[in-house]
Amino acid sequence: MENTESRRAPYAPLQPHGPSPLEKTGLPPRLKELAFDVVVIGGGIAGVCAAVSSARHGARTALVQDRPVLGGNASSEIRVCVAGAWSRAGGKKVEERETGIVEELLLENRFDNPQDSYHVWDHLLYDFAVREKNLDLFMNTQAVDAVMDGERIAAAVCWQASTETRLILGAAQFIDCSGDGLLAAAAGAPYRTGREAASEFDESYAPPVADGWQMGASLLLSTRDLGRPTPYRAPSFAVKVDKALLKRRGLGPLAEGFWWVELGSDADIIADQEENRHKLMGYVHGLWDYIKNSGEFPQAANLALDWVGSVPGKRESRRFIGDYILSQKDLVERRHFEDTVAFGGWSLDEHCPGGLLSPDLPPSFFHQHFDRAYEIPFRCLRARTISNLLFAGRNISQTHIALSSTRVIGTCASMGQAAGTAAALCAARGVGPRELGERHLGELQEALLLNDAYLPRRPASGAGDLARRARLRASSTRSGGAENLVDGVPRDEDEVCHHWESDGLPATLTLDWDQPTPVGELVLKLDTNLHRKLWKVMKAKRVGNQDPPDPVPPELVKSLAVEGLVDGEWVPLAAAVGIRRRLVRLSFEARAVRSVRIQLLETYGHPHAKLFEVRCYERAPDFSARGAER
């Protein structure tokens, strides 16, 4: 007899009884209202540096990122290099690469991502953020509105697409590092778009008449050599590319993308974004079709597309108006600002209006290179009309011409660390950014300098630094002198030496005091070769992984030991092995010592060791909320 039960469809109900209790209608109530000290909008490199700096200064911090990965233009989605102030006229070797938090990131990438994978870099950035104990990360989340309380932002209204959750994030201070600045615009902060007239700020590189042109967004590509002829068929949306379009644009190496595959706007570049994205995808494939199928590039026969971007990398949109508008003359005349908090040095790299739609113009004018770093004042990072709002990145208060330099990622990172530090201090002191700049500017700058940010022509004050009272002795000297380590300038600046370099290893630096002195913390600034461009790791130009990866800087000290002279005997105080960053802070039980001896034991390959700064404290300055309570 046939068993009909076994033929029933799997999991089908034996007898329907109306709607299943599992059936639902409508949207579940997903609303979260959370309170923070600081909310950072935008998870590019500027936003990551801002959020990490804020969290490290004791502020409960939220980082809101509208993409599934951190890094913004430097992420695997877009793949722009982490360039910064290293660009120099005439190839001069001036030590002005960014240090601080962004250097931590790039050094970790050298240690943990020697294979130069952008996707591993994404996860390295993610780890860098989530391991901060005071930092909450909200991915796939966009700030879409601001709840206002008079002239201050009370909360950011956010939408997390992945969880269909509405988030109301309240905070004492907000930092908009999103580039486009949707939160700031929603809050009513005034901004500019387009190019200023030359006469407004006396800018020689600006046009005679103001207009709406903004530098465009680009799509990149990368290729792989398959070792055999590889055909290519363009998709339906490809745009035909020929010699006429490329007459001012060199193709160069075919292994990496072409930064000039770019479209700008003379109107609302944000509103034009999706239309431009579609066109850019067409131009990328049209260009590759021309390279592969025109017969003019036999060297491309074995190359295949390995990756093509789908998210354009933006250069310009809103520039919010702060208490000062940075302009061309501030950069080219290297003006000194008493409230300097960040720096840059990339060339005035203004991309042409229209991008690919202006084939008769060069893709970028490269108006002027700098042989020294320029300064960015705190007034450019704070909103003019919103009392608790800061900016970092390309949306700070500046002209279009100034933006052509400051927009690069390393410079944005420098601003991010400054804004995050400032926001945490504001939250701790119960003041706004303007009052912080007027009443606590020195405290802000000292906090940045202690944490290895660089402020040109602004040495550290040395307040509380016991090393300033000591006599310094070196076991050997190859260059510089031990006295340079306490002059407040933690790098060679303007071709003036501020370091001590040993002659061989191991080497010893000794600090002597006339009386027993309580020491419980040591701060060192090591050598990571600031002439070197660490961002090279992010350049997508490897073909078949044939190029060797860039090594960890061999000049970096790998291990050291610290001893103190207590009651006539040398006793161990601290040690560090496997060092992975320039800034080393060693804390230990405070002891009354007559001397401290720092033994530099080995580097990552260099035969000598170099130091740029040494500080000693009973307890280092605490700029956090906890420090404010003392």
Image (tube, rainbow, N blue to C red):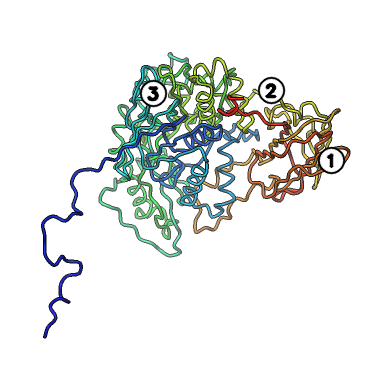
Which residue is the site of mark 3? 153
Question: Is 487 rendered above or below residue 555?
Answer: above
Task: Tell me residue 384's x, y (percent).
Answer: 43, 17
Residue 191 at x, y percent in the picture: 38, 21
Residue 371 visible at all: no
Q: In this view, does 63 lie above or below 146?
A: below
Mark found first going from the N terminus, 3 or 1: 3
Q: How crowded is mark 2: few (under 14 residues within 10 Å), some or many (20 or more)?
A: some
Could you tell me which secondary element the residue under label 2 belongs to?
A: loop
What element does badge 3 sit on? Answer: strand
* Residue depth check, mark 1 versus mark 2: number of the one nearer the observer: 2
- Left or right: 330, with 43 as reference point: right
Pointer 2 residue: 461
Q: Name the side, left or right, on which 579 lies relative to 305.
A: right
Q: Which residue is drawn at 69% across and 38% down?
A: 587
Q: Position of residue 332 (x, y in %)?
A: 55, 22
Lower position in the chain sequence, tag 3 or tag 2: 3
Q: Nearer the viewer, mark 3 or mark 2?
A: 3
**Farthest residue, direction right:** 568
